[in-house]
Amino acid sequence: MPQATQTKSSTAAALKELKCRECGATYELKATHVCEYCFGPLEVAYDYEALRRTVTRETIQAGPNSIWRYRPFLPVTTDNLIDVGTGMTPLVKSHRLARRLGLNQLFIKNDAVNMPTLSFKDRVVSVALTRARELGFSTVSCASTGNLANSTAAIAAHAGLDCCVFIPSDLESGKVIGTLVYGPTLMAVKGNYDQVNRLCSEVANTHGWGFVNINLRPYYSEGSKTLGYEVVEQLGWQLPDHIVAPLASGSLFTKIYKGFQEFVKVGLVDEKAVRFSGAQAEGCSPIAQAFRDGRDFISPVKPSTIAKSIAIGNPADGVYALDIARKTNGNIESVTDAEIVEGMKLLAETEGIFTETAGGTTVAVLKKLVEAGKIDPDETTVVYITGNGLKTQEAIQGYIGEPLTIEPSLDSFERALERAQTLDRLEWQQVLV
Ligand SMILES: *Cc1c(COP(=O)(O)O)cnc(C)c1O
């Protein structure tokens, strides 16, 4: 059979069914996310033999410069893809941050510049809304900690879908404005994310909407696998030795793992042990606490941290994330809000990347793990930066100095410069003594 025809037909055939992660019961590929028998989460299953026969490095490289180059591994059958340029964000070799931390092979996966709304959530939403349209939904929705609201509203606008999103009412203004501008109905709920999520589960049952992270969750979460695929491709078709990524529900973390495994399974990359380390904010660290205590269950917490985008007190995929960190010889660590601010500044000052609080958390955990000797300097380490700092400016206001306000004259400028340099010298002297 000619290669092109075969690719097309077996690609659709590679998408098999929904399968319960706990008991293995299988379901048709509909808008459902919980097993009727054991209440376990459902996951999309593929025919990897079909994928092995039809997908090569070349077929991927011939695809679009977006997540859709990995389409055979994504849970859609339509040709009517929503492609707003999501994915294929830079993998940057770190020099200055690496030297500061004492690492020799550090890479930064920079989803702070993902399209269209500057966070990794554009990946999961592009997939979820493509699938939602395919399943016939005309209204899409989500329970969000901020970035998901931005992404769902923007991509729904692009696709011409009606949109109603739910957020906790205390989010950063960048997240609120960055949602409203796309014209959705925005519900700001007086409560934390876990309460928003509970409310949304009820709405999903009564309104027949496509909630990207509830009834469409099995499809949505598959979008995160592209963060694994891209790193493999950008490293020259190799797996890294160690990854460090933030944990909210834990979904992203587990899907990077699934992505790596799938590429090994279908023969796109050689097998290698990859260590998985996760990052949480101290003020919402149920997974890190379970890891530290050696527990295999999560005790829900009430979030209180500046890292609002990852503040999920009852993480749906927490136990799976725990399991992956343990069996890969990784770690799950947490850092304080002060360390998160320092992490944001450190990444900005050494690499020119302005990340939000979630990225500050991840960088701070990376630093902590290196200092504790838990990352080998020669390991090829990838740190995932998942969001953009322009959206959480409140978090660092007051910690980054002030502009020097001057008169429009050379004299005023010279005096200000002199003062700035004196201050700089004083700071250096303090560092030296
Ligand atoms: C949502 C989010 C995460 C983590 O998401 P999971 O629920 O663990 O998949 C990480 N970083 C940012 C910036 C996010 O918005």
Image (cartoon, grey):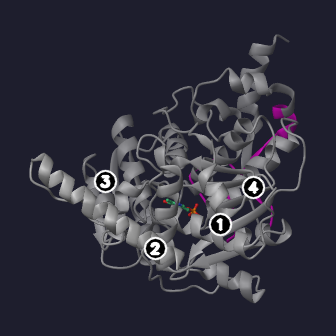
- Asked if the residue at tag 4 contacts the one at tag 3, i.e. Cβ–Cβ closer than 8 Å, the answer is no
Residue 70's spot in the image, x, y percent? Answer: 67, 34
Q: Say which quarter of the image contains residue 65.
A: top right
Q: Residue at x 64, y 47 (%)?
A: 227
In the rendered structure, which segment of residues is drawn in magenta? Answer: 22-51
Q: Say which quarter of the image contains residue 273.
A: bottom right
Mark in front: 2 vs 1:
2
Q: Residue at x 64, y 30 (%)?
A: 69
Left/right of residue 52 with respect to residue 366 in the rendered view: right
Q: Which residue corresponds to mark 3?
A: 179
Q: Which residue corresponds to mark 1?
A: 366
State the CA–CA distance, disc 3 to disc 4.
Answer: 30 Å
Residue 30's spot in the image, x, y percent? Answer: 60, 49
Residue 213's spot in the image, x, y percent? Answer: 52, 59
- Asked if the residue at tag 4 contacts the one at tag 1, i.e. Cβ–Cβ closer than 8 Å, the answer is no
Q: Is residue 67 visible?
A: yes
State the CA–CA distance, disc 2 to disc 4.
Answer: 47 Å
Dot 2 amino acid type: Gln
Q: Earlier in the sequence, mark 3 or mark 1?
A: 3
- Asked if the residue at tag 4 contacts the one at tag 2, i.e. Cβ–Cβ closer than 8 Å, the answer is no
Mark in front: 2 vs 4:
2
Q: Which residue corresponds to mark 4?
A: 257
Dot 4: what SS?
helix
- Asked if the residue at tag 1 contacts the one at tag 2, i.e. Cβ–Cβ closer than 8 Å, the answer is no
Q: Quadrant of ligand 1?
A: bottom right
| 309 and 6: which is toward the camera | 309
